[in-house]
Image: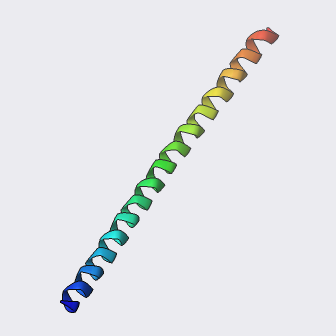
Amino acid sequence: MDRFAAVAMDVLVWVVFVVLFVGAALLVKVAAALLVVLVVLALALGLTLRLLRRRRTR
């Protein structure tokens, strides 16, 4: 019975490790996607402000 408990504990540790690893990988992907979205929005805002400034000076 002790052997079974040890194997079950090993399996549980590995499952938790895999879940945490996959979760961290997904978080990194989400963070990268958010960073790309923020960069695109910043560029769009910069272009919009530049166009508005050019129209006002004319």
Looking at the image, which residue is at 35% across and 69% down? 16
Answer with the quarter of the image where residue 13 lies: bottom left
Answer with the quarter of the image where residue 19 lies: bottom left
Q: Looking at the picture, tell me which residue is in the foreground, 37 or 6.
A: 6
**At which x and y percent is residue 21?**
39, 66
Task: Answer left or right for 52 relative to 5.
Answer: right
Q: Looking at the picture, tell me which residue is in the foreground, 1 or 36.
A: 1
Looking at the image, which residue is at 51% across and 49% down? 31
Answer with the quarter of the image where residue 11 lies: bottom left
**At which x and y percent is residue 34?**
52, 43
Looking at the image, which residue is at 22% across and 91% down? 2
Looking at the image, which residue is at 46% across and 54% down? 27
Residue lying farthest to the front in this orientation: 1
Q: Is residue 46 above or below residue 7?
A: above
Q: Is residue 52 above or below residue 10?
A: above
Q: Looking at the picture, tell me which residue is in the foreground, 49 or 38.
A: 38
Quadrant where the image shows the C terminus: top right
Q: Is residue 4 above or below residue 54?
A: below
Residue lying farthest to the right in this orientation: 57
**At which x and y percent is residue 43?**
62, 33
Quadrant where the image shows the N terminus: bottom left
Number of numbered labels in the structure image: 0
Q: Looking at the picture, tell me which residue is in the foreground, 19 or 43.
A: 19
Q: Is residue 5 above or below residue 18?
A: below
**Display coloring:** rainbow
Task: Answer left or right for 10 relative to 58.
Answer: left
